[in-house]
Image: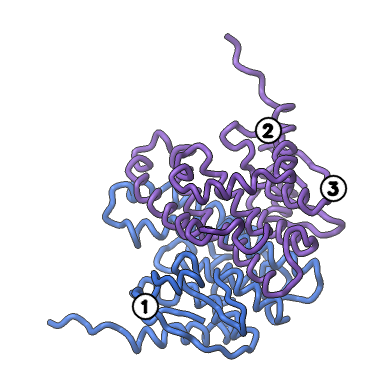
Chain colours: A purple, B blue
Amino acid sequence: MTAFRWVPPFAQGLVRDHRVRWALEEAGLAYEERLIGPEDQRTESFLRQQPFGQVPVYEEDDLVLFESGAIVLHIAERSEALMPTEPRARARVKAWMFAALNSVEPHVMNYTSLDVFHGQEEWARLRKPSALAMAESRLSGVAKWLEGKEYLEDRFTAGDLLMTTVLRILRDTDVLKRMPVLEAYRLRCEARPAFQRSLAAQLAPFARNAPPAPKG
Amino acid sequence: MTAFRWVPPFAQGLVRDHRVRWALEEAGLAYEERLIGPEDQRTESFLRQQPFGQVPVYEEDDLVLFESGAIVLHIAERSEALMPTEPRARARVKAWMFAALNSVEPHVMNYTSLDVFHGQEEWARLRKPSALAMAESRLSGVAKWLEGKEYLEDRFTAGDLLMTTVLRILRDTDVLKRMPVLEAYRLRCEARPAFQRSLAAQLAPFARNAPPAPKG
């Protein structure tokens, strides 16, 4: 699996290969990482593996896969730790996987990227209230669903895994602090040993490859 | 399957139930539609089926599914018309399904929603160039991938189905006119009889339930 050699602190622990590491840890599967840098992302050979020049790319024998959601699904389909065996329950897990990545993440990203990528721009300041309202509307849907439940369905699944990685994108905001059901859910999922191992695994190369601190 | 009784013209042909109708037509499966209106979207009983109050909800025996991507996947897993049988090829189809909905659609929506939902707002005018650049960057990745190919993989699959429904969101812009490979691909997929039938099926209730035209 590809991952980045180093990323700035705002992205550490959020880069999408973390989802795949977490799924592999839950499934008890060993993996090797291939670390790349910005100079590798635009090469012809990399774009033939990942059309958008992003990480992660996942290789297993002669299968090459991209899209963190699809890779997590591929692993989950082979591991009862991430997906029950009963067909209807499996379909429900996939519904939550798409919900996390298509109904929630885009709006969470729209809100957090205002500060992270556009903090100095006038439009970002003006856009903030409507972006927050849209993100909160989708998050409220999840929070309401989770009331009285530990997980999205009746046990931890790949749907919870992806939803948690989406909620984590809000870590530098106070949005989840105002939604105690969601915050408790995030903490419950992050307390899993497989989560802890996968996070440590992503962070390790960043520590090794950190650029020298500015002198002074 | 739920669909809307009526939506304004800008959304006609784009509402997400169209994806599911198209998948069902490709698979040769009959279905019944249950038409709803805005007054139904926020009811407790509907939110228990669709946590975000959106369409479509899909019911099959005692399975209730939401998220158009997950419903199309559910249908595709049962129909060779949408997904080959070979396991690696199936994993690749799912990669493109997630690519369409997680790597391309959010950026396409960000661009088109500026005019559709925020046309009168100052931030939307200022935001436009960067939103267009981001959408074009992801679309270029798909266009480059498609060079010399008819489909994303070696035949039409559920990945092409979802990607086409994402490209269609740009119909009122000139973005695809500047990307002839993508435009030809969209037209190729839309020429399929199953696409034509599914589009007609979504539009039929909108014609029946159109509000009275303003007098004068």
Label 2, on which residue?
Answer: A6
Which of the numbered marks, if any, corresponds to residue B123? none
Q: Residue at x 73, y 59 (%)?
A: A82
- On the image, which quarter does residue B147 sit in? bottom right
Label 1, on which residue?
Answer: B37
Q: Nearer the observer, disc 2 or disc 3?
A: 3
- On the image, which quarter does residue A152 sit in? bottom right
Instruction: Give the Cα separation between the discs numbered 2 and 3.
Output: 22 Å
At mark 2, the secondary structure is loop
Label 3, on which residue?
Answer: A30
Q: Nearer the viewer, residue A41 or B85?
A: B85
Q: Nearer the observer, disc 1 or disc 2?
A: 1
Label 2 chain ID: A
Mark 2 residue crowding within 10 angstroms, few (<14) / some (14–19) / many (20+): many
At mark 1, the secondary structure is loop
Number of labels in the image equals 3
Say whether disc 2 or disc 3 marks the residue closer to the N-terminus: 2
Label 3 chain ID: A
Instruction: Give the Cα separation between the discs numbered 1 and 3.
Output: 49 Å
Kind of residue at badge 2? Trp
Label 2 near label 1: C-beta < 8 Å?
Answer: no
Asked if residue B66 lies left or right of residue A134, the reply is right
Kind of residue at badge 3? Ala
State the image coordinates of residue B169 (x, y, percent, origin top left). 46, 67
Mark 1 residue crowding within 10 angstroms, few (<14) / some (14–19) / many (20+): few
Q: Residue at x 35, y 43 (%)?
A: A123
State the image coordinates of residue B76 (x, y, percent, origin top left). 67, 77
State the image coordinates of residue A149 (x, y, percent, origin top left). 57, 59
At mark 3, the secondary structure is loop
In this orientation, does residue A113 appear? no
